[in-house]
Image (cartoon, helix red, strand yellow):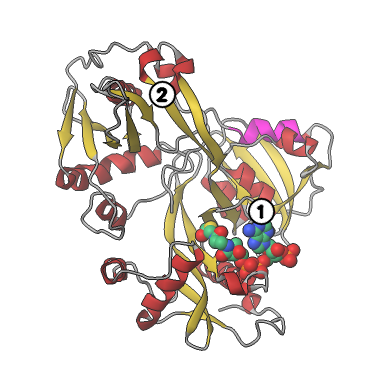
Amino acid sequence: MSDRADIALTAATADIDVRAITEAEYPEWLRAVRAGFLKGPVVPAADVEARRAQFEPGRFIGAFEGDRCVATFRSFAQEVTAVGGGFVAADAISAVTVAATHRRRGLLTRMMTRDLAAAKDRGDVVATLIAAEYGIYGRYGFGPATSGTVWTVDVTRAGLDPRGPALDGARIDLVDPDVVRKLGPELHDRVRRATPGAISRGDWWWQLHTGAVRTDPAWTEPFYALYRAADGTVEGLVAYDVDDKWADTMQPSNTANVRSLIASTPAAERALWHYLCSIDWVMRVKSDWRAPDDLLPHLLPNPPAAGVAMHADWMWVRILDVVRALEARTYEGEGELVLEVVDGSGLAGGRYLLEAAPDGASCTATTRSADLTLDVGELGRLWLGDESVVRLVQLGRVREERAGAGRGADALLRTSRRPWCLDMF
Ligand SMILES: CC(=O)SCCNC(=O)CCNC(=O)[C@H](O)C(C)(C)COP(=O)(O)OP(=O)(O)OC[C@H]1O[C@@H](n2cnc3c(N)ncnc32)[C@H](O)[C@@H]1OP(=O)(O)O
């Protein structure tokens, strides 16, 4: 561990030990996670056993007062798709909790400082997380890099042919979980390569989402519908459940809740949404968390039939290595940009020259005068192309050192489609 992890302890937490947990401490750590997320402190034995496969020495951090775990933090290896389809090594952070009795004494700061230093030492390019609340992670250099939108489609107003999608030789089949585990990962790999902001799904994800591993006693098996193109290629997969609601007059009033819909072609995407909207008894279709520029509303003849049910920041990114992060992505335009990156933690700050072109980019430390000055969190916000530099200049979050530099930076950094992180972690 580097000396970046050494921080001054306040008197209030000096007697609390922040360290990696042992496997024997895993049940106590899980109890603390559940309590921190207000789920009740009792962890069913089956849950502990199911989760044991996930345990990784060194990556599960706990804060202990004696034997009692009062704070939790976990990170794991992840790949994030950069703009252009390259995969970048990420330190994915989750299960962050501090006991209600121990909050606001710096325990999160201690765990985060330790984890980010370790990630930097390991050579991870970015750290990622999905924030429970907007105000928590900016102070650690994270910026909201993607957002998510949940849509609700009023099927009766959508204007789609109730007979279902015209498949032109393609087919949609209901399949069992074992088929999903067999065919899903390869499809997902194609989808994530084409989707900046997407993250890797390990075997655990497929096990958990097909019921092979159960951590939640209330989990029920969804329907899985698989789309195969006319040549047999698997191009789409949707997992959904239906809530079995009937109106007083015995009219069907069901909502199909999409747990996950992935498609590697627009044809598969269009067909699967149409399929969902044509299931008898289903009056509403509620989507999973999708990109804010998802095709969905415009796949309907009457787009306003899809309303935004929820919209929020989704995956946050903390750049740990500016050079590798900026070289890992592609650029549609050509140009140079000098960035003064401010990072109070000392992990990634410095002045960098980005020389970008459609056929490749280089990023190097420079002494040239800066075009823009920005906090590392703002760079995280910009990295996947979702935010406008001009807007951040207007908000006072990025400073233009040269007039017009914001517009020039947007021409390099912005992308035609918005990034999308498909998963919660
Ligand atoms: C990736 C994930 O797992 S997201 C899940 C996050 N977990 C939760 O939301 C569960 C409920 N909340 C908690 O467990 C805790 O309150 C935590 C983890 C959010 C914060 O832990 P704490 O130990 O209290 O944080 P810590 O004392 O290190 O605070 C550091 C700073 O962040 C601020 N802060 C902490 N929590 C919040 C918050 N929810 N909103 C805004 N600011 C916050 C503190 O005020 C402090 O600010 P300061 O440095 O200006 O004084």
The residue to which callout 1 is attached is 135
The quarter of the picture where the N terminus appears is bottom right
**Residue 412 is inside the magenta segment:** yes
Q: Is residue 17 visible?
A: yes
Element under disc 1 = loop
Q: Which residue is drawn at 59% across and 47% down?
A: 326
Q: State whether label 1 is within 8 Å of ligand 1.
A: yes
Classify mark 2 as within 8 Å of ligand 1 or not, answering yes or no.
no
Q: Pinpoint residue 50: horizontal percent, then vertical percent.
A: 27, 66
| Residue at the (73%, 47%) spot, across then down | 339
Whether residue 267 sits left or right of residue 36 in the image: it is left
Q: Which residue is drawn at 22% across and 46% down?
A: 221
Q: Nearer the viewer, residue 45 or 340?
A: 45
Q: In which quarter of the image is the C terminus?
A: bottom left
Instruction: Tell me which amino acid carries mark 2.
Output: Val
* Residue 277 place in picture, x, y as percent: 31, 21
Foreground disc of the pair 1, 2: 2
Q: Is residue 148 above or below residue 106?
A: above
Find the magenta span and give its range: 406-414
